[in-house]
Image: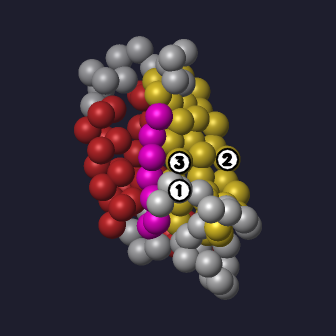
Amino acid sequence: MADEPAGSGGTEQPRILTVFRSRTAAGAYDAGYEERAAAMEAKARAMPGFVEFKSYLAEDGEKVSVTVFASRAEHEAWAKDVDHRAAQADGRQSFYDEYRITVSEVTSERAWHRA
């Protein structure tokens, strides 16, 4: 079976992919990190245009989260959400030692799966 285009195909605008790489600070879990992260994930999933969220923890302690929204406008609505902005401020103050955010347009995607 050959590779096939993934996703809905033929969309007018590219989906928006955000990669959030972070390292939690000492005491972040005592400061409510897990609860806040779960609440933000639930809220993101409820936003118009939400497509997908996955999170991975590397052996060296770095966490990588990948979020996809269907359009730039829907991504921007999430980026500007009041609760999300407050969580970001709390993250800088209490939860993270460092983070890096990369946002890009998905212009091509291929997938393969065993039938």
**Residue found at x 45% / y 46%:** 54
Residue 13 placement, left or right of 40 = right
Magenta residue check for 51: yes
Q: Are marks 1 and 3 in contact (CB under 8 Å)?
A: no
Query: Quick one: which residue is furthest to the right in this view?
Result: 107
Per the image, label 1 sits on a secondary structure element best described as loop
Q: Nearer the viewer, residue 73 or 31?
A: 73
Q: Can residue 79 be seen in this view?
A: no
Magenta residue check for 80: no
Magenta-drawn segment: 50-56
Q: Residue 30 appears in which quarter of the rendering?
A: top left
Query: What distance separates the C-alpha of mark 1 from that of mark 3?
Result: 21 Å
Mark with earlier residue (1, 3): 3
Mark with earlier residue (2, 1): 2
Residue placed under numbered mark 1 in the picture: 113
Residue 102: image tag: 2
**Residue found at x 67% / y 79%:** 13
**Residue 89: image location, x then y, percent:** 47, 42
